[in-house]
Image (cartoon, rainbow, N blue to C red):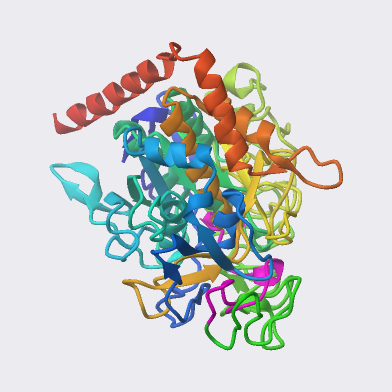
Amino acid sequence: MEIPIIDGLVMGVPERVSDAEMAADYRISSIESDLELSGNESLYGQGVSFIRPLTRSPFLDRQQHRYEAPWSVLKLFDQPYDDRFFSGVLQHDNIPDPVAFALKKLKMNSAPVAIFDTGMQAYHRYLWRIAESAVNVVEFVESDDIFKLKTETAFDDNGHGSHVAGIIGGILDPQHRWGAGANIDLYSVKVLGDDGMGFLSNIIYGLQWAIDNDIKIVNMSIAYRQDSPAVRRAIQESAKAGVIMLASAGNKSNYDPNITLKITADGGSADGGSADGGSADGGSADGGSADGGSADGGSADGGSADGGSADGGSADGGSADGGSADGGSADGGSADGGSADGGSADGGSADGGSADGGSADGGSADGGSADGGSADGGSADGGSADGGSADGGSADGGSADGGSADGGSADGGSADGGSADGGSADGDLNNALPKFSVMYPARYPEVIAVGASNAYGRLATFSNFGDEIDILAPGANILSVDITNGDAMKGLGITSGTSMAVPYVTAAVAMMLAVDPDMNSEEIREILTGTAHLMAGGSTVGDLNLVAALEEVIFRLGDNASRGDNSKKHYRKRLKAKIKAARRAALN
């Protein structure tokens, strides 16, 4: 399939055709393997879930304007909450004025949001009013010799994407009906299959679709460990076109030296699980609770205070660093469909071994090299990736990103897939990223990188962290839509992960744009980071402060009422014309 926004193609190549033969074609500037990890079978299909169900109906008192809400929403709305429980009572009359103003403005200035995930259950009680059309990047249909993305009613065969969507709808719902009354249009871009896994090219397809369909905000609760030049360029082009992208930093359980490349949903309650946020099956304050929880702050199922566990085990079924979480395990088993610390995917082995038939000793993964690099020391005569020249020429006019010739290294030994005498391409990634650091695509500077915080206002134990993090947001014990536990129409459930943190920042961005539709990504990032609650210990990264961020937007709006940046609109128009021209050419 053609990808005009990066002047690229995704294509299958017979095994007998080598990368060197393709690189010899003057029309080809770089080659990159479109890698995939095959995870376990669908968690939902196996009858297990990474989400713990809420076994009662949410509390509400319409006469007194009191509604049950997740602790995370209460925190962001500056309302009191008990940090031992996953929910509490929201008093509508006490919602801060900037929040109420932004929610009102959403009726007129709602920016479309695309959710890159496992899909979205359009028929769920709390999603059906806000779920717009969907595109399935995982599957294609062939029509008139053109490969088109399948547009259809949104569906989710995993549950991760629906939980993420429910978080956005829940906080943006002025009627506090868990998203049923939200003034937001959510577009499902299914880039991950039922096992929570997908191809890297799916991200590029999704971004191209977002540009072509005037999507303003993209929520990516996905993560992988090695830079992909093709995805990087798609991210850069999307940013130039004015797309505001947010992505999860990744969970500690995402790191496994035996997995060659991981693009997977970050959520689930593994590796830290809900031990970071209170007790399981806890009741809400003044509303009573199910499963043995007492009203007015009592704990449920024997759950203890300060993040103590329920039923003598871990909260919400998840445990930190080693315990299993509702079928998945952390740091030793699989979490959300992927393997962790010991399991390999697609036959990839550690310690210099290769994945998918690639050779060791500098051999490349997937039977060839990524981004033009070749086995045993780089490409022939030093040809570099991404349009770089032979005999020592580097890519992109002298930059790394293609690496240097004759085994010369870029980015720590390999040039975006090219190997250098012992290094491998997409094979051994022990040096790809430091352990527990921010993963891609959040690591790209054009993307707002989101880590997870807990109910105590601290970095969640399961969250990756690093200098690339822009903002933290609630990610532990998050109550949202659940389709995995037998009630796909109206279920709610609790899970943890950096995936759950991203949609809170996405919702904040939507509210900021409702107040000032002309804001760009750089301004939004500056306000989010400048108004955040700083963490203890002198960290420069803070926790999302929604009220202060909206106050700053309103304050700036008075000084910038007449401004408007049309450059990104023009760039998007150019890219859309490019996509349209490619379609016309394919028809002829």
As drawn, 198 above or below 19: below
Residue at coordinates 37% horizontally, 58% vertically from top-left? 119
Q: Which residues are magenta?
A: 260-289
Residue at coordinates 58% horizontally, 53% vertically from top-left? 501
Where residue 31 appears, as percent x and y from the top left, is: 49, 37
Instruction: Tell me the quarter of the image containing the N terminus.
Output: top left
Residue at coordinates 54% horizontally, 79% vertically from top-left? 288
Q: Is residue 190 magenta?
A: no
Relative horizontal placement of residue 144, taking residue 485 as reference (left or right): left
Q: Is residue 7 visible?
A: no
Residue 403 vs residue 200, the one in the foreground:
200
Residue 241 vs residue 81, the one in the foreground:
81
As drawn, 553 above or below 504: above
Most extreme residue toward the front, as rendered?
Answer: 63
Residue 294 vs residue 584, the one in the foreground:
294
Where residue 243 appears, as percent x and y from the top left, is: 44, 31
Q: Is residue 265 magenta?
A: yes
As drawn, 342 above or below 440: below
Instruction: Tell me the quarter of the image containing the C terminus.
Output: top left
Q: Is residue 513 visible?
A: yes
Relative horizontal placement of residue 494, taking residue 238 as reference (left or right): right
Where residue 565 appears, as percent x and y from the top left, is: 44, 15
Per the picture, the main secondary structure of the magenta-coloured stretch is loop
Where residue 480 appears, as percent x and y from the top left, is: 47, 64
Q: Quadrant of residue 238?
A: top left
